[in-house]
Amino acid sequence: MKKNTAILTLLLTVLAAVGLIYGAAVGFGETQTGAAKNIKLGLDLAGGVSITYQTVIDNPTQEQMDDTVYKLQKRVEGYSTEAVVYQEGNNRVNIEIPGVSDANAILEELGRPGSLEFQDVMGNVLIEGTDIKSAEAKGYTDNLGKNSYEVALTLTDEGAEKFAEATRENLGLQIPIVYDGEVISAPTVQAEITGGNPSITNMESFEAAERLASTIRIGSLQLELTELRSKVVGAQLGEEAISTSLKAGAVGFVLVLIFMIAVYFLPGLASGIALTIYVALMLVLLNAFELTLTLPGIAGIILSIGMAVDANVIIFARIREELATGKTVRSAMKIGFKKALSAIVDGNITTLIAAVVLGLRGSGSVKGFAQTLALGIVISMFTALVVTRLVLNALFALGLKSEKLYGVQKERKTFDFVGKKNLCFLVSALLILGGAAVMGVQAGRGAGALNYSLEFQGGTSTTIPFAQEMSIGEIDANVKPVVSEVIGSSEIQAQQVQGSNDVVIKTKELDLETRQALNKALAEKFGVDETAITAENISSSISSEVRSDALAAVVLASVLMLLYIWFRFKDLRFAASAVTALVHDVLVVLAFYAAARISVGNTFIACMLTIVGYSINATIVIFDRIRENLGSAGKKDELKEIVNRSITQTLSRSIYTSLTTFIMVAALFVMGVASIKEFALPLMVGIVCGAYSSVCITGALWFVLRTKVRRKVE
């Protein structure tokens, strides 16, 4: 690269970085397209209400489901323009209404879709809700300037015939509109109405017309629905989550940049520019693809920043190794990028497999985590292999050619990792068996092997923000009796939320009326803000599906990774070793969940699959080096020496990548809200465990399989 070209490259790169940062911060044009503030927020960040309904009949037609989704969408649009209704599976409907201020009131008003009937004054049914296609509020001004409001109905063909007969026989009489046994309106028939387009006139306001139209729409559903799950989240909690997570991300990002520059000098500076572009590009694309950002999604972004460092570390370690063999800086950079490519591609694809499985098998906020993680993986490959390379070559062309600016790999004495395999295997076995023992003891005491959240066992979870911290003794003596009296049950679990005054109360599944009564009792007894109390309700049927989905997701991801590694390395023993190591990591982290009594819910699935992908990523780097060293090994080289040398050569990468990722997640744990802490803590354990297993377990395990399994794999 010539000097002028290098200057132009750096200038364009800096302009691109500034442009992306500007786009993420401010946006482009009058609509501020691309601005981070325009990113769609999930309910856990924006606050609001989420409900999952299931049809009473098992196999509704698609026409019935489409009709139900459409009418519910019309119903909820009155609460928020961003409210969405969508079908899940063949017999479920999800409703999400973000950004509302009084979610409990909306949940009560929306209620369970009930039956709608138009009756005569004697109570005989004239038409039913299923005879109504649509209902819409309208307002207009007459020639005298008087405002009038009405509800315009559109009937089915059969409904139009029924209504024509009904209005003909009830001229001058009222036709009560009855919703779930309650009269919601009683318009008087002015004339016989044919054609199937009647109107309910003389409404006192447009809001009243809209309320009536909404009730008619929801009452005209073709399907009867039952509530499976509901969740109410306060907007204040979401604002705090965004604020603390962004601060944690900024602190972690700065620490990572300082670390990279301190360790890798000039290449570290190049990676800093690339990582800055990475973050800004991530925010812009989240907006462009209209992805919904959730609380775990923020964790996914911050985690992917740490993982984005990995590709740079692999490249820089390779460059230093080539410089140590006497290569020139130009040659070392060229060879370093080339040799690092296979490890980067294979490692990222296996992690991407975990993200895709999570996106397909997960739901809600977990799906948001998978989307941001997958997007982060793709962007990180681009910034590492393209942006970092362009910047590094440009800096070199400007005259920064001294080896001291790039660093030379110091010769390391090969450590006998394989020789310590029995000790490492024993430590791992003790950790896993210890976890099994802890789960057995807890199950025997009736506490449950794991601390299952609502997603896994069903019930109602109520989070109470007390004015001051309450001890377990105070909760047992003061709070539980109040809850027990309201719900009529003594089966209550209470948990303090670390780092706050919040207390989580888990009970049997409660209906909306009982939940509201509980909120009122807590507010009267303890002076808590009733509107700040949040609740989540999940039926036992949906929790059993979550458990099976979690197991299926981990198994499916493991199988797909095994097949990919087998295909890439042409040796089943590589794949078997890698998958055994990731199962080891999952079991160790599971033991930590049991011992620390961390809540096992949707984020548990995300955490486990992230650890699976992360562990595989580290393992592949070592296996890639073993494969390379096998190809260049002389006849006198022993297999044990090749494995030990490969692990030693990649040791700095294993340590540095684990450390930078750990820094990002640790910042999230220290500064994040309680729900983020529950996700970050086991993830930190998984990062440490993944580094340990990739260095101490996988290579040694492959060596054992290679030497003990005699069958040759061509």
Image: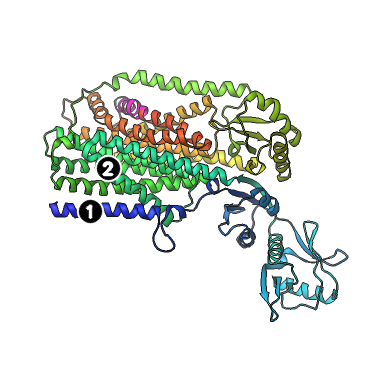
Residue 658, quarter of picture: top left
Mark 2 residue crowding within 10 angstroms, few (<14) / some (14–19) / many (20+): many
In the image, is residue 319 above or below residue 162?
above
Looking at numbered disc 2 in the image, what kind of residue is underneath it? Ser
Q: Which mark is residue 271?
A: 2
Image x and y of residue 646, in percent: 25, 29
Q: Is residue 551 visible?
A: no
Q: Quadrant of the C terminus?
A: top left
Q: Is residue 280 left or right of residue 85?
A: left
Please state if 436 lies on the left or on the right of 332 as rendered: right
Q: Which residue is mark 1?
A: 11
Residue range in magenta is 692-708
Q: Is residue 158 magenta?
A: no
Give, as a three-letter code, the residue at label 1.
Leu
Determine the CA span between mark 1 and mark 2. 16 Å
Residue with the most extreme bottom position:
143
* Disc 1 secondary structure class: helix
Estimate the x, y position of residue 378 in percent, counting from the top left: 35, 48
Quick check: 677 above or below 437? Answer: below
Give the total of numbered labels.
2
Q: Which residue does the image show at 36% across and 40% down from the upper left? A: 253
Labelled pair 1, 2 in contact (Cβ < 8 Å): no
Q: Secondary structure at mark 2?
A: helix
Q: Main secondary structure of the magenta part?
A: helix
Q: Is residue 537 visible?
A: yes
Q: Is residue 355 above or below residue 66?
A: above
